[in-house]
Image (cartoon, rainbow, N blue to C red):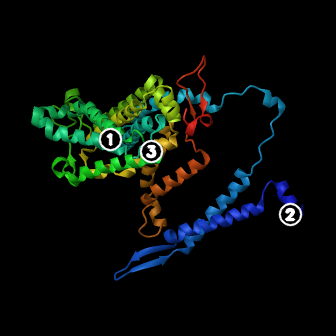
Amino acid sequence: MSSQDLGATRAGYDWPAIIKDLIGTTIVSLLLMVPIVAYKSVITQYSLVLQARWGTVAIILAVILGARLMMHLFVWNREPAPVSAAKASAPPKKSLSEQIGPWVFPALVAFAVLLPIISGGDRRTIDLGIYILTYVMLGWGLNIVVGLAGLLDLGYVAFYAVGAYAYALLSTVYFPLWFGDGMVPWAFYITLPIAGLLAALWGVILGFPVLRLRGDYLAIVTLAFGEIIRLVLINWFDFTNGPQGITVPKATFFGLPFTAGPGGFADFFGIEHNRIYYYMFLYYVILLLALLTYFVTNRLRRLPIGRAWEALREDEIACRSLGINTTNTKLTAFAIGAMFGGFAGCFFATRQGFVSPESFVFIESAIILAIVVLGGLGSQIGIVFAAIAIMGSFELFRELSVLQEYLPEGTDPVHFRMLAVGLAMVLMMRFRPRGFVTRRQPTVFLKERKAVSGDLVKEGHG
């Protein structure tokens, strides 16, 4: 063995392999960055000119190689610490996550309930809370299909659209036609369960053609289903008003509108009119809907249908051999998951006051699926953290307009938000491939309930 090899062995680093990896990283990075970063198209008065930006390429490449080298030196080639015999024989202690785990959800609920008070009635904070809670509810609904039943659904936004358009059409066309204008202030409360049932019906309609499909084939069919619904909303102009959308009435407090005139919410309770009351009302409505989704899902997991979902997710052949009706199991997963998407869509319509097909594009399904995957498939609490991280980061980039003076002309920091989220997903899949929360509380246990590590079950579920 040469002196150089001996030195490399003693240091614990294989320098030839590290250098080879850095060279490969450089080649791949240049192949990706040359067409995307190295040249920028600039429209002049008479022509389109390509502007070279090799300096930016060099800076990005240096950052990538530096990070890659640090990973080689301090993460990937790190030797495990020696374990003493006394420490090895000692009984394992509960980790910090196991100690604080039972208190996380009550703390989150308490914080959510008190958020409007803590924020001092700040409209932007409350609106952000509504925004995040909507995606938390959507994530919990999709988690039934993807996380518990193991059915990859890329068209979940279709059920979201069904709920929204159910409220829009019933409150603006059919309720006034059937019952008169006096029913409109109560339209949200009447339409909410109807929207959920209609979405569940479409979930069953989607479920029947895909009973024999799994994996990539199921994903393609559900993606096509979502696009079909969107195209129907755009082209069926007589029914949905097409791309022009529908203006819908806002929700009321059990028939009391949030207006300044007599007969309004403030007049009924004898308080001064303030627009913030409407946003606080919407916040607590979506909070109640999200908590309803959480408790129903948790309850279903402990029932035979929930155990059938998990059995289907782990191994469909073994599931059939146990006598479980996989047809009913899949259809119930699609229907119940779609129902919560319909509830969220109905709330979205009344919150926005306007619905159009542009709100239900494929990227919405991708974002909801990303929340479920990053949170940890099958994990309810993980979805909350993932929704806060992803949707909160979207709003954070809106506040970075101060960076515009440091960026090239015409560059908006908001345009980088999807890039940042994509980078975060890549890092998560590299360092925590099973999501934020990798431990699950088992639904069936003998004598003592113990958390199950994601490493012991398929795809990190438990």
> With 6 as the anchor, is 398 left or right in this view?
left
Most foreground residue, 284 or 189: 189
- Residue at horizontal 14%, vertical 35%? 175
Mark 1 belongs to which amino acid? Phe
Of helix, strand and loop, which one carries label 2?
helix
Most foreground residue, 142 or 121: 142
Most foreground residue, 269 or 349: 349
- Residue at horizontal 54%, vertical 66%? 32
Mark 3 belongs to which amino acid? Leu
Q: Is residue 392 above or below residue 322?
A: below
- Residue at horizontal 34%, vertical 40%? 206
Q: Earlier in the sequence, mark 3 or mark 1?
A: 1
Residue where numbered disc 2 is placed: 4
Q: Position of residue 293 (x, y in %)?
A: 39, 31
What is the C-alpha distance between the residues marked 3 and 1?
Answer: 14 Å
Residue where numbered disc 3 is placed: 369
Residue where numbered disc 1 is placed: 159
What is the C-alpha distance between the residues marked 2 and 1?
Answer: 63 Å
Mark 2 belongs to which amino acid? Gln
The quadrant the C terminus occupies is top right
Of helix, strand and loop, which one carries label 3?
helix
